[in-house]
Image: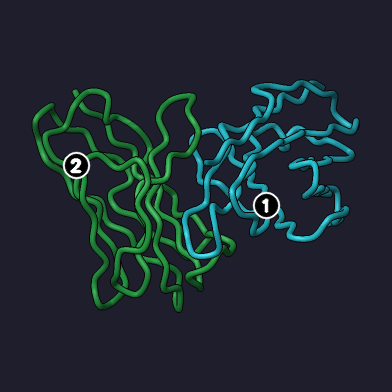
Chain colours: A cyan, B green
């Protein structure tokens, strides 16, 4: 089966750093995606991790530990526009659907 | 702009009716995915097509059906609509059959009254 857990909501301050965790259980692993979704808008791709470790992309970094079934998204130098939901997603297997977590709603305070 | 288009943007209809949502994938993408997102709910995978063939099914109701046409656009048909079907319906496309980055369309907001 497939199960993805993320915190429902988080709050952080503009200019700070925040880490959004995701734990998953999957019968087969083919990478992990992070998407950003502003309210009422389409999700947009942020990152894809298939190997263990940290991948950095500007202010956003994503970490994966396959042995622990754990990933996090790290957002640095937070800006007000980063207020959004962040979705963790895991493919069920190589040729199958991608399962999305319920998302973490991030609130940025000035 | 992801390159994925969806029409209509908004749709308001009554219970018991039938509607069709349309999606055009990015140029060159062969895979199309449909998702439902209700208020405060995560993205629920409905169905995937690849090059005209159904490849994977999620929690799609029997009242719902979809198809992908030779020009690769896809349609999601929702029938015998219920109040609970009110949601955002997203289409996404990717270039391959396997796990790959999905590019989402702007969505169709369906309201069933």
Q: Would you name the residue on which mark 2 appears?
A: B62
Q: Is residue A11 above or below residue B9?
A: above
Residue A19, quarter of picture: top right
Q: Residues within 10 Å of mark 2 (few under 14, many from 20)?
A: few
Q: Nearer the viewer, residue B94 or B107?
A: B94
Q: Is residue B68 above or below residue A45?
A: below
Q: Is residue B1 visible?
A: no
Q: CA distance from mark 1 to mark 2?
A: 30 Å
Is residue A69 left or right of B41 when viewed as pictured? Answer: right
Q: Position of residue B57 (x, y in %)?
A: 35, 52
Tag 1 subunit: A
Is residue B82 left or right of B99 when viewed as pictured? Answer: left
Q: Is residue B71 visible?
A: yes
Q: Is residue A45 above or below residue B82?
A: below
Q: Position of residue B29 (x, y in %)?
A: 45, 73
Callout 1 secondary element = strand
Q: Residues within 10 Å of mark 1 (few under 14, many from 20)?
A: many
Residue A101, quarter of picture: top right
Callout 2 secondary element = loop
State how many labels appear: 2
Tag 2 subunit: B
Q: Would you name the residue on which mark 1 appears?
A: A32
At 64% across and 59% down in the image, what residue appears? A30
Q: Nearer the viewer, residue A7 or B19?
A: A7
Residue A110, quarter of picture: top right
At 49% across and 54% down in the image, what residue appears? B104
């Amino acid at each position: 089966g497939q199960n993805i857990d993320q915190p429902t909501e988080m709050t952080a301050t503009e200019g700070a750093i925040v880490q959004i965790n995701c734990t998953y259980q999957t019968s087969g692993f083919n990478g992990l995606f992070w998407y950003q979704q502003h309210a009422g808008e389409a999700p947009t791709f942020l990152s894809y991790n298939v190997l263990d470790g940290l991948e950095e992309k500007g202010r956003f970094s994503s970490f994966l530990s396959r042995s622990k079934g754990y990933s996090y998204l790290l957002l640095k130098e937070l800006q007000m526009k980063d207020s959004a939901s962040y979705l963790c997603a895991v493919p069920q297997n190589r040729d199958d659907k991608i399962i999305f977590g319920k998302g973490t709603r991030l609130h940025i305070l000035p | 702009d992801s390159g994925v288009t969806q029409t209509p943007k908004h749709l308001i209809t009554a219970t018991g009716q039938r509607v069709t949502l349309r999606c055009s994938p990015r140029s060159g993408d062969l895979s199309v995915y449909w998702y439902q997102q209700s208020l405060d709910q995560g993205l629920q995978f409905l169905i995937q097509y690849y090059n005209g063939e159904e490849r994977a099914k999620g929690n799609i109701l029997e009242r719902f059906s979809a198809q992908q046409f030779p020009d690769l656009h896809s349609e999601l048909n929702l029938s015998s609509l219920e109040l609970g079907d009110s949601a955002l319906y997203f289409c996404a496309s990717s270039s391959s059959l396997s796990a790959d980055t999905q590019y989402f369309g702007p969505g169709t907001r369906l309201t069933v009254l």
